[in-house]
Image (cartoon, grey):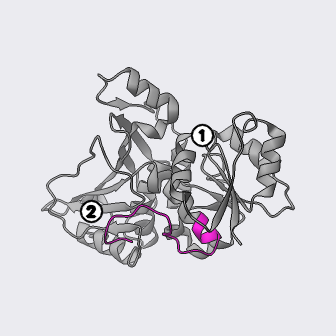
Amino acid sequence: MPDTIFIDGAAGTTGLEILDRLAGRSEFDIITLDDARRKDAAARAEALNEADIAILCLPDDAAREAVALVDPVGTTRIIDASTAHRTDPQWTYGFPELVGRERIAAARFVSNPGCYPTGFLALVAPLVRAGLIPADWPFTVNAVSGYSGGGKPLIERFAAEPYIAFRTYALDMEHKHRAEMKLHGGLAHPVIFAPSVVPAYRGMVVEVPLHLGAMPGEVTADALRAALAEFYAGSSIIRVHQDGALPELLLRADQPASDAMELHVRGNAGGYHARLVATLDNLGKGASGAAIQSLNLMCGLPETEGLLLPRGLE
């Protein structure tokens, strides 16, 4: 019998991408509300409690309101794509590669990771756990994303301002992703986060530069790369590149949709510096693809079912 799925916020960017990945899948029945009812609290409450799994593609406050509409002793399970519950200890963090697929499969409440934290945590969390880089290091995150990550308001701004080639923000040194990075990375200090947006619809590059020569021990870029490769061995979604000689990494204006993530580790000849880099689709593994991955696991299905993966990662 198919699982019933309700996407609260299905008209938004993330919701539309999730619907696209669910299209034609016989394992699910999608509950839909017409335009006249999708903002009606009673209709939403009925749909939320009728669903086996509800996926929330809403702003933070609206996501909290949706959770409050769910019967606490009912059976509806929730995947929340907002920021609202990512550091809540009552919720399971929806990053199967880091928290364990079994935990996602058994969870009632799953918080979808943020797009920038997905790249950062994929690079840093395994290395901190292995003791290769210190948890109390003052980490810096430099990142650039396609403008779809800002939702409809930012999409409209870039359409209205085609002359803008680069937009950096969070210059007050505050951003809601920082708490998520610190907690799930097991870090002692908040990170310095420098996000930017460029005129590409989708795609993301997240970089963590490291001064290995200032760290305790004699860790090399090769050792970091090998540790990441071992951690993600067998993954159908995350690939660690072994070629350390790539001259450049590109983010194309017409970047294709993808639910994969690529990790790179580059080091200088002296071994004192390293650049950890993750490339991913902010609407894929950074949002909708991650939600589908968790949905598959929660329904006892292969985790890659319905995902957009390049040849060799299926």
* Cα–Cα span, label 2 and label 1: 38 Å
For the point 45% across and 64% down, which residue is it?
125
Q: Residue at x 23, y 48 (%)?
A: 250
Which quadrant of the structure image shows residue 221?
bottom left
Part of the protein shown in magenta: 295-314
Question: Which residue is denoted by mark 1 in the rendering?
Answer: 11
Answer whether labels 2 and 1 touch (C-beta < 8 Å). Answer: no
The C terminus, quarter of image: bottom left
Q: Is residue 179 above or below residue 89?
A: above
Tell me how many marks there are: 2
Magenta segment includes 307? yes
Relative horizontal placement of residue 81, taking residue 270 as reference (left or right): right
Q: Secondary structure at mark 2?
A: strand
**Amino acid carrying mark 2 in the image:** Val
Q: Amino acid at mark 1?
A: Ala
Can residue 188 be seen here?
no
The percent position of residue 254, horizontal first and vertical second, equals: 30, 43
- Residue 194 can be seen in this image: yes
Q: 188 or 168: which is nearer to us?
A: 168
Location of residue 92 in the rendering, given as x and y in whole percent from the top left corner: 65, 63
Specify the principal SS of the magenta part.
Answer: loop
- Residue 265, labelled with which disc? 2
Q: Is residue 228 left or right of residue 186?
A: left
Residue drawn at (40%, 75%) of the image: 231
Is 124 drawn above or below residue 154 in the view shown?
below
Q: Is residue 265 left or right of residue 20?
A: left
Residue lying at 51% horizontally and 32% vertically, measured from the top left = 152
The answer to which of marks 2 and 1 sits earlier in the sequence is 1
